[in-house]
Image (tube, grey):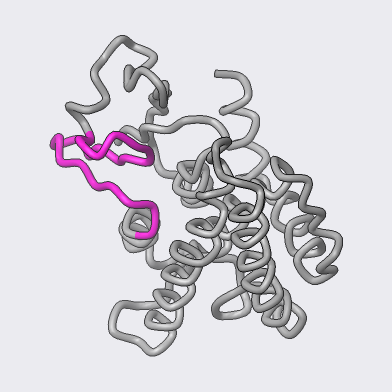
Amino acid sequence: MKLYYAPDTCSLSPHIVLRELNLPFTLVRVNNQTKRTADGGDFLAVNPKGYVAALQRDDGDVLTEGPAIVQYLADLKPEAGLAPPNGSWQRSRLQEWLNFISTEVHGGFGPLFNRELPPAARDWWRGRLEKRLAYVADALSRQEYLVQDRFGVADAYLYTVLRWAAFFDMDLQRWPAIAAYMARIEQRPSVQAALAAEAAA
């Protein structure tokens, strides 16, 4: 398998999951501006959407969208327990969290990356995002992880997007449950290995 990624993007989430599962894969770095891969390829030929992450199987089929990718990977090794079984109530809970992270947290950070966003609009989006983070903090004050009381694919995704808070001087210490959660996940060998690999590329 090949994982097409760019540093400091949501592709860190499937990267962590691949390492957590100890699956064989090749990292292919993508330049988000030029849409060229590190080996000179045209990323748009891999993913016409033009953004990471993209997972290419050995048969050439490509899967995009992080929440779909991490569930596919988790199902390759169900015994690892990174996602509950398909059809279970807990799997629906996982999908609930993945959708919330995707639309409300990941999507909440999105407008803040626009440097041309007027200050009033920036303040509005930031305030909206902070309400979502308060919801996350409340959940994490009652449990160490999002689903099944153990690390799973939703945690890899939430950890990934919450790292972006540093880009906007948003101090996660304001939410102690989130700060503790981030520190807990960052200690995982899979997370350390993924961060090191992306920093070295």
Up the image or down, 169 lies above or below 71; here it is: above
Instruction: Name the spot of residue 68 as percent of width and height, x first.
Output: 32, 58
- Residue at (39, 79) in percent of width and height: 91
Q: Quadrant location of the C terminus?
A: top right
Asked whether 55 falls inside the magenta stretch, the response is yes
- Residue at (53, 46) in percent of width and height: 16
Q: Which residues are magenta?
A: 47-67
- Residue at (28, 47) in percent of width and height: 64
The residue nearer to you, when weighing 83 against 154, is: 154
Q: Quadrant location of the N terminus?
A: top left
Instruction: Name the spot of residue 28 as percent of width and height, x first.
Output: 38, 24
Q: Main secondary structure of the magenta part?
A: loop
In the image, 84: left or right of 108?
left
Up the image or down, 191 lies above or below 151; here it is: above
The residue nearer to you, when weighing 124 against 160, is: 124
Asked whether 122 falls inside the magenta stretch, the response is no
